[in-house]
Image (cartoon, rainbow, N blue to C red):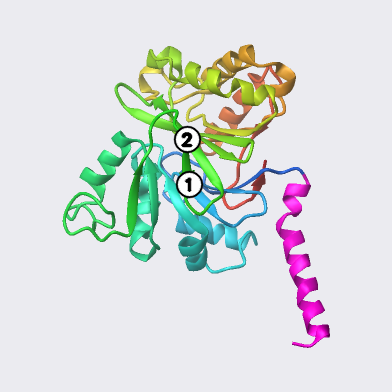
C-alpha cells in the first residue's frame, strides 16, 4: 500500500471513530431505541427497548413484545442503515425478559426461527414459564438449551439472581435485577443496566407497593437513591398503564399517574429534588389510545408537582441519556 492510500484510510478511520464516540463527547451515556412502547391491545407496538452504550451498536433488548416491526420502523426513521435481518441477528446481542406475559415476549417467540444464537437473561421464575409454556414442542419449537427435547440450542438461558450483577455478553454492559410485584404472587423484574459508572433503570410491569402489599419498589428506591444523588442514574423507564379512573381491583399489578407520582415522591425523600429532576422519567406500557391516552398524559402532567422530566417515547425514535 502506498503512503497516500495509507493516510487516506487512516483519516477515514479517525472520522469513523470520531462519529462513534460523538454522543459520548456530547454527554450521553446510553442510547435507547423503543421497538414497542404500548401494553397489550396493539400487537405491532408492544413493550421492547434496545439499549446500548452511547456510540455502540451492541444492544441488549429489554423485553421483546414487538421486535421485527419495531426494527422496521427504526430503519424508516434512519436509526439503522442495515437491513432488519442484520440488526436482529448481529446488533441485538441478547434479551432481558422482565416477566413472561405475551406482550413482553411475543416478538422473541415469533422471531426465534430467524434469529441468531444469543442469551436470554431472566430470573428463575421467568425462565420457568418460558421453558415450560412457550419454548415447548407443543406450543412452539424449543429454540433453547433446556426443557423439551430436542433442544435446538439457539438461545441460552442465563439465570439472574436478585441484587447480583451479571455481565451482558458482547455489550460492554452489566445488569443487576430486582424483583417487582405484578399482581398477587406474580413476579416481574426491574433491570439496573450499567456501563462503566453510569446506570439506566428499566422496570417491567409493576404495581405500587401500597396496592401490592409489598416493599419491592421501596427497596429498589433505596438501592438507586445514591445513584440519583451522584448523577449516575441517567434515566428511569417505568410503566403507567391506566388513567386514574381505573378501579383498584382492575389494575392487575399496574400503575396509574397518581400511583406513579406517589412512588416517585418516596424516591424523592431519599434523594434531593434537584438531582431527581435531572433524571428523565420515561413512561412505558400505556394501555391507552385516543382520548384515553390524552387523558392519561394530562393526568401525569397535572400530578407532576415535583417538576420531573417526563418523557413519552415514540416507536422507532432514538432516545439518548
Inspect this view and state whether residue 1 appears. Answer: yes
* Residue 24, x across and y down, in percent: 73, 48
Residue at left offset 34%, top offset 28%: 187
Q: Secondary structure at mark 2?
A: loop
Inspect this view and state whether residue 66 appears. Answer: no
Between 286 and 292, the residue placed more toward the observer is: 286
Residue 117 falls in which quadrant of the image?
bottom left
Residue at left offset 71%, top offset 24%: 277
Q: Secondary structure at mark 1?
A: strand
Q: Is residue 300 above or below residue 214?
A: below
Q: Is residue 246 magenta?
A: no
* Residue 308, x across and y down, in percent: 69, 24
* Residue 146, x across and y down, in percent: 23, 50
Please state the extent of the stretch shown in magenta in the rendering.
1-26
Residue at left offset 39%, top offset 62%: 115
Q: Residues within 10 Å of mark 2 (few under 14, many from 20)?
A: some
Which image quarter is the C terminus in? Answer: top right
Q: CA distance from mark 1 to mark 2?
A: 10 Å
Give the number of the disc on residue 312.
Answer: none
Q: Magenta region, mostly helix, strand or loop?
A: helix
Residue position marked by numbered label 1 in the rendering:
168
Residue position marked by numbered label 2 in the rendering:
165
Residue at left offset 36%, top offset 49%: 106
Q: Is residue 19 above or below residue 165?
A: below
Residue 229 falls in which quadrant of the image?
top right
Which image quarter is the N terminus in? Answer: bottom right
Q: Residues within 10 Å of mark 1 (few under 14, many from 20)?
A: many
Amino acid at each position: 500500500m502506498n503512503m497516500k492510500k495509507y493516510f487516506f484510510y487512516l483519516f477515514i478511520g479517525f472520522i469513523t471513530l470520531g462519529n462513534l464516540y460523538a454522543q459520548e463527547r456530547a454527554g450521553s451515556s446510553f442510547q435507547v431505541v423503543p421497538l414497542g412502547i404500548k401494553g397489550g391491545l396493539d400487537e405491532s407496538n408492544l413493550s421492547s427497548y434496545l439499549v446500548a452504550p452511547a456510540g455502540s451498536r451492541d444492544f441488549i433488548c429489554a423485553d421483546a413484545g414487538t421486535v421485527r416491526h419495531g426494527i422496521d420502523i427504526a430503519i424508516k426513521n434512519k436509526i439503522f442503515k442495515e437491513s432488519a435481518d442484520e440488526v436482529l441477528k448481529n446488533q441485538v446481542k441478547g434479551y432481558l425478559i422482565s416477566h413472561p406475559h405475551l406482550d413482553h415476549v411475543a416478538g422473541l417467540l415469533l422471531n426465534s426461527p430467524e434469529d441468531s444464537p444469543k442469551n436470554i437473561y431472566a430470573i428463575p421464575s421467568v425462565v420457568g414459564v418460558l421453558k415450560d409454556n412457550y419454548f415447548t414442542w407443543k406450543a412452539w419449537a424449543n429454540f433453547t438449551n433446556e426443557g423439551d427435547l430436542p433442544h435446538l440450542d439457539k438461545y441460552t438461558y442465563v439465570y439472574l439472581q436478585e441484587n447480583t450483577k451479571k455481565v451482558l455478553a458482547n455489550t460492554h454492559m452489566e445488569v443487576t435485577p430486582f424483583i417487582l410485584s405484578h399482581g398477587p404472587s406474580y413476579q416481574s423484574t426491574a433491570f439496573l443496566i450499567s456501563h462503566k459508572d453510569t446506570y439506566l433503570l428499566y422496570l417491567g410491569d409493576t404495581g405500587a407497593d401500597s396496592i401490592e402489599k409489598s416493599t419491592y419498589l421501596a427497596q429498589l428506591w433505596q438501592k438507586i437513591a445514591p445513584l440519583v444523588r451522584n448523577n449516575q442514574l441517567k434515566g428511569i423507564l417505568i410503566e403507567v398503564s391506566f388513567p386514574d379512573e381505573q378501579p383498584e381491583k382492575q389494575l392487575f399489578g399496574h400503575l396509574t399517574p397518581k400511583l406513579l407520582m406517589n412512588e416517585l415522591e418516596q424516591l424523592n425523600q431519599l434523594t434531593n429534588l434537584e438531582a431527581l429532576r435531572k433524571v428523565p422519567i420515561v413512561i412505558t406500557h400505556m394501555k391507552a389510545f385516543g382520548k384515553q391516552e390524552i387523558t392519561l398524559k394530562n393526568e401525569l402532567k397535572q400530578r407532576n408537582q415535583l417538576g420531573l422530566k417526563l418523557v413519552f417515547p415514540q416507536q422507532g425514535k432514538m432516545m439518548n441519556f
